[in-house]
Amino acid sequence: MLQILGKTTSINVRKVLWTCAELGLSFEQEDWGAGFRTTDVAAFRALNPNATVPVIRDGDFVLWESNSIIRYLAGRYRGEWLYPADPCERARCDQWIDWQASELNRSWSYAFLALVRHSPAHQDPRQIELSRVNWAKHMAIVEQQLAHTGAFIAGEAFSLADIPIALSANRWLETPLQHDDFPALAAYMTRLAGRDGYREYCRNGTP
């Protein structure tokens, strides 16, 4: 059976859990990470030298990096409806998946660590505000795209790209800071509410 190593409170682990829900995959989950079993041990580093979650074991196959994992699962378990085979449609999904990791994630770092994780090293009010503004700028890109499609992040149909983007949107909405008015984003989150994976792993009150 597919094994998922990582705690549910991790946004990156929740990407994998939500993908499994969409694909109808059974799995066993082990809680690893801060507050649970430490990843800074030889046995875990043998699976992932970065000592980060998530990691999956699928039989003898081991994989780390959340976005690589969700792509693998969709490809391995008949998820063409979620991650299209057509090169253009797939590339459109990939651009939003990669943007979430490379741009959107970086924009929230300081504000999130300050306001949610309450990190003592991230309590400079000026840096918090700079991070908030940068985060809002990136969320405005999401708003613009959703207003353009009128549906989902990569187009008219739900796709693999919606999983990381919606999880990031949830983090934005659940972090106690000033939020701009983004009506297309609000409609998007309402649209997603009919999905079991969304209800269990996205809007679960855990940013």
Image (cartoon, rainbow, N blue to C red):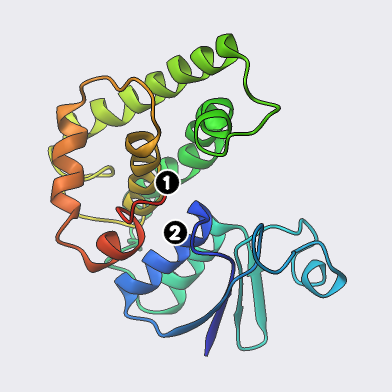
Q: Mark 2 points at which residue?
A: 15
Question: Would residue 58 be found to the left or right of residue 154 on screen?
Answer: right
As measured in the structure, the alpha-carbon distance from the residue carrying label 2 to the one carrying label 1 is 13 Å
How crowded pointer 2 is (Cα within 10 Å; few <14, some 14-19, many 20+) is rated as many
Q: Name the residue under label 1.
A: 207
Where residue 139 appears, as percent x and y from the top left, is 35, 27
Of tags 2 and 1, the one toward the viewer is 1
- Tell me the amino acid under the disc marked 1: Pro
Nearest the camera: 110 or 152? Answer: 110
Q: In the structure shown, which secondary structural element does the residue marked by tag 2 occupy? A: helix
Nearest the camera: 170 or 154? Answer: 170
Q: In the structure shown, which secondary structural element does the residue marked by tag 1 occupy? A: loop
- Tell me the amino acid under the disc marked 2: Lys
How crowded pointer 1 is (Cα within 10 Å; few <14, some 14-19, many 20+) is rated as some
Farthest right residue in view: 42
Residue at image position (41%, 49%) is: 164
Where residue 197 appears, as percent x and y from the top left, is 29, 65
141 to 67, vertically: above or below: above
The image shows a total of numbered marks equal to 2
Question: Would residue 28 be found to the left or right of residue 141 on screen?
Answer: right
Looking at the rendered structure, which numbered label has been put on residue 134? none
Quarter holding residue 75:
bottom left
Question: Would residue 41 be found to the left or right of residue 85 on screen?
Answer: right
Question: Would residue 73 be found to the left or right of residue 160 on screen?
Answer: right
Residue at image position (38%, 81%) is: 25
Nearer-N-terminus badge (2/1): 2
